[in-house]
Image (cartoon, rainbow, N blue to C red):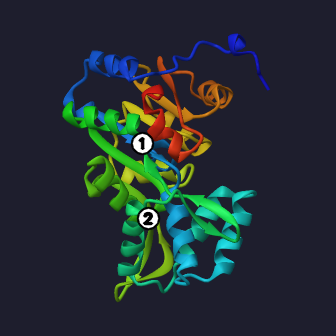
Amino acid sequence: MIEDRAALPNVPEVHIGQNILSHIQSLNVHESQRIAVFDLDNTLLVGDIGDAVLAKLVVSEEVDKHHWREYRDLLGTDRAEACRKAISAMAGLPLKTLVRTTLWVLNEESTDVTIDGFPVAIPRPHTGMRSLVQSLLQLNYQVHVITASNQVSSQIAGSQLFGIPEENIHGVRSRVVVDALTGELIPPIPIGQGKIDTYAKFVGDSPPLIVAGDSPMEIPLMQMVPSSGICIWVGESRVISEIARGKLGRPQGFYFVQRPSSVTSEFQEERAYI
């Protein structure tokens, strides 16, 4: 592990957003090329909407607790399978219950949902990233979200907190029969390489000019960005951002944006980020 900050290659660490915004405004591209793609959890949000909603469903006894335990176990070994488990666990759940629970999570004032003694953070918008999205919308960018959280909760969070059109928010979809989720996943499944398939189906053939994410699952999308585009790595570790950057190579604009370590610190010190 690289611990010496000076030993890291130069990656601009962004404060108050001026570097990124200036770079975006300098891009001389046709409006049809103005496409930006964001991950949702731990990128636009500080926290994970899928985790919080599933935890609340379990605490409310809408979903059996063994599903949560299986999901948490899978997170440590196979994140993609864990994401699938989070959706299949909701088989039989009325759609209106998922909507109601998502709205509860987004409006809850406490910082977490506690399950099995484990605090699951209530997600909050990363205020810097929200400002960035608003600037892109004003510049007539098509702003899309491609996320491994469930489609329903993702659309509610992305539209209500960031003003992104619901039809531009692409999460993991479950087939619905008689207003209840079946747990059957509908492809493409936006996990890892599946994010490329999701992009192709819902966005199109033109590559994204801007991609922002926080995990290796975003690297396939970042690899689509042309040399004139921008990649934004949102996280707590510059070392991890360098691993991602090493797999990209092409984009000249690579920015590291700090993510707060907790939800509360984001509101106390939001000026320190992006």
Task: Spot the residue most to the bottom.
Answer: 178
Residue 163 appears in view: yes
Q: Residue at x 35, y 89 (%)?
A: 178
Mark 2 or mark 1: which comes first in sequence? 1
Crowding near the residue tagged with mark 1, few <14, some 14–19, many ≥20 C-alpha atoms within 10 Å = many
In which quadrant of the rendered view does residue 143 lie? top left
Q: Determine which residue is flagged by label 2.
A: 105
Q: Determine which residue is flagged by label 1.
A: 38
Q: Residue at x 56, y 17 (%)?
A: 11
Kindly report the distance in space between the C-alpha atoms of the residues bearing marks 2 and 1: 21 Å
Q: For the N terminus, give its image quadrant.
A: top right
Residue 251 appears in view: no
Secondary structure found at label 2: helix
- Three-letter amino acid code at the position of disc 2: Val
In the rendered view, does 155 fall on the left or right side of 122?
left
In the rendered view, does 154 fall on the left or right side of 56?
left
Q: Position of residue 54 (x, y in %)?
A: 54, 70
| 258, 213: nearer the viewer | 258
| 114, 103: nearer the viewer | 114
Q: Position of residue 262 (x, y in %)?
A: 57, 44
In which quadrant of the rendered view does residue 227 lie? top left
In which quadrant of the rendered view does residue 181 lie? bottom left
